[in-house]
Amino acid sequence: MNVPSWDASYLESTLAMALVTAGFSVYHFVSISDKTKDRFFSKYGEEKGNTKMIHFTRYLGAMTIGIIPAIIMVLVMGKSFGDYGLKFQNGLTSLYWILGIACIVVPMNFFNSKKEKNLAFYPNVREKVWSKKLVAINAFSWCAYLFGYEFMFRGLLLFSTAALIGDWPAIVLNAAFYALVHVPKNLAETVGAVPLGILLCLITLTTGTIWVAFFVHITLALSNFFFSLRHHPEMSVR
């Protein structure tokens, strides 16, 4: 049997793929764990416990999917966070992309959020009465989670694989990973993740930063959250 030879140039992309696999697995299995749910439910009750658990798992995901892997990558590879897209450049081009995509995403979410299928799942936090503080905390937890998420997918994973195998193979690989992590949600989000993932990868490689991908994802998540909260017949803000 011929064992494939190892090349030092493989380390960066291999490490990124290993870290996204491990980080997302930790986040996912903690978030669906009955022990985690029972711990929060027994301490806060079912409704408040569900809210606390969702916010906890989002912060956990930010750490395990993005922040901790980024620190490991920087330490092991001797690079900076900027090498993985965490930098400010091409600001005007980025702003055009963000506003352009927002003009499509926000109206789409406004109409989609009214559907029973959407309201059965969103907002993820199922409190009947929301305080303004809870709205702010829920929005912030989304931002934290999506920062770690985009830093991994459009940052660490995309830039490390593109350097080894080229832009388009890296984009396809990234979109595949991105679709797979949506499988636990539903078929529609899994399928939709492919074109969105490809677009965000293209924009990221063009601008050299993760910020368009991050703010587009924030716009997508928060507009759906706010519209779903507004349209949900059993929820109100006081």
Image (cartoon, rainbow, N blue to C red):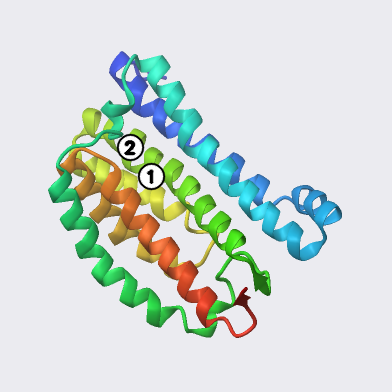
Which residue is pictured at 22% across the width and 61% down the height? 99
Please indicate whether residue 173 sits to the left or right of residue 71 in the image.
Answer: left
The residue identified by callout 2 is: 155
The three-letter code of the residue at mark 2 reads Gly
57 and 201: which one is in front? Answer: 57
Classify the position of the C terminus by image quarter: bottom right
Image side of residue 236 versus residue 36, left or right? left
Q: Quadrant of residue 229?
A: bottom right
Q: For the residues marked 1 and 2, what is the alpha-carbon distance in whole angstroms?
A: 7 Å
Residue shown at 71% from the left, 59% from the top = 50
Question: Which mark is on residue 29?
Answer: none
Image x and y of residue 89, in percent: 18, 37
Residue 150 circle label: 1
Give yes or no for contact between labels 1 and 2 (Cβ–Cβ under 8 Å).
yes
Above or below, 106 against 146 in this view is below
Place of residue 76 in the rendered image (x, y in percent of width and height, measured from the top left)? 41, 15
Q: Quadrant of the N terminus?
A: top left
| Label 2: which secondary element | helix
Q: Seen from this angle, which residue lies furthest right? A: 42
What percent of the width, then of the height, locates residue 156?
35, 33
